[in-house]
Amino acid sequence: MDATSSADVEITLNDSTDGSIMIEIHQFDGHKYTAHVIPGQTTGVQIGEELQLADPHQVVLVSAVGDKIGMTENKAVTKAMIEASREGKWTLVRVGIQIRVLAGQDRGNVEDYVPDPPTALIVPGTYLRTTLIPKLMRQGAEMGQHTDYDMRPGQGGWPDAHKVRLFNDILWPDHNIVCVAVANLPHPRAYSECPEDVQQFTKERFEDYLDKYRLAMDAVRLHCPRADVVELFATVPFGTIKGHFKEEEDTRTCLSWLLPRLREYLSQTDHVKHLDFLCWEDKWVDMLKSGADEVLQD
């Protein structure tokens, strides 16, 4: 197996008398691998040896909620990691991905965000319109023109489900924002008026939620004229207000799975290896922090 590839990991209990758990690994190209772990005993080194990784120094195993185990580490898989990942996925990702959570009314406020490296902002919008753009303009940003891209033409019941609005001509003195990508969310009223075309997010529909982020980042990589200079993605929680999630439990679960899966996404890209996740509401920080390498909070 290529040590720089990404893989999804699903877990099923077997009937082994030694108490081991079989981890079934689904590599992105369709290949399957299995490893057996004993909670509290099996280490990253042992998993790496069983998987026969080409270069175990280049990958790390990440649980569904963000616990990380290097394939050259003597850190053991715990029972808590297994339990937390039963409904989600483990991923095998590249080392070197750095994710920060910036939390609170100051650090988590996009309007006051001033990144050092060249950055692409990834934000949600209702029918591609976001309140952030006029707020940034009041802070001195010149946004220029925008272009809309359908990232998956003809797919989905709602024709605009996979559209992204990209602002490429940004001039904002003393800020290093290269572009802004707006992921498309429906008006909350649509969930009741057009239930066959649009559905609220649930943990069972987590991939649809994750796609909002991935497609916006894809739009930056594919359509931003200055994509080659972008070193950092910066984003926020999508849909946590206005009824985009069916239940609050769905919100919490999807947010707890989000950063580990975005780490997987960044493992598959060639350039951007850093992500800042800005979270203005403190109540979501506990869901996010286990998937981050660093949490900076007011």
Image (spheres, helix red, strand yellow):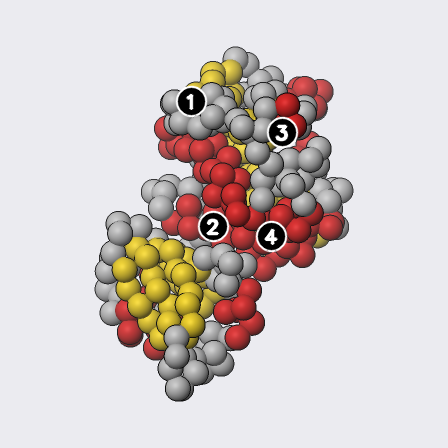
Residue designated by label 4:
253
Measured in 3D between alpha carbons, the distance from the residue under mark 2 to the one under mark 4, in whole angstroms, is 13 Å
Residue designated by label 2:
261
Measured in 3D between alpha carbons, the distance from the residue under mark 1 to the one under mark 4, in whole angstroms, is 28 Å
User: What's the amino acid at mark 3?
Assistant: Tyr
Mark 1 vs mark 4, foreground winner is 4
User: What's the amino acid at mark 1?
Assistant: Asp
Q: Earlier in the sequence, mark 3 or mark 1?
A: 1
Residue drawn at x 43%, y 83% is 19
Circle 1 sits in a helix, a strand or a loop, which is it? Answer: strand
Circle 4 sits in a helix, a strand or a loop, which is it? Answer: helix
Residue 183 shown left or right of residue 281 in the figure: left
Residue designated by label 1:
150
Measured in 3D between alpha carbons, the distance from the residue under mark 4 to the one under mark 3, in whole angstroms, is 20 Å
x, y (%) of residue 62? 45, 61
User: What's the amino acid at mark 2?
Assistant: Arg
Measured in 3D between alpha carbons, the distance from the residue under mark 2 to the one under mark 1, in whole angstroms, is 22 Å
Residue drawn at x 30%, y 55% is 27
Q: Earlier in the sequence, mark 3 or mark 2?
A: 3
Is the residue marked by circle 3 packed among few (<14), some (14-19), or many (20+) residues within 10 Å?
some
Q: Is residue 269 above or below residue 226?
A: below
Mark 3 vs mark 2, foreground winner is 3
Q: Nearer the viewer, residue 173 or 146?
A: 146
Is the residue marked by circle 2 packed among few (<14), some (14-19), or many (20+) residues within 10 Å?
many
Mark 2 vs mark 4, foreground winner is 4
Residue designated by label 3:
191
Labelled disc at residue 162: none
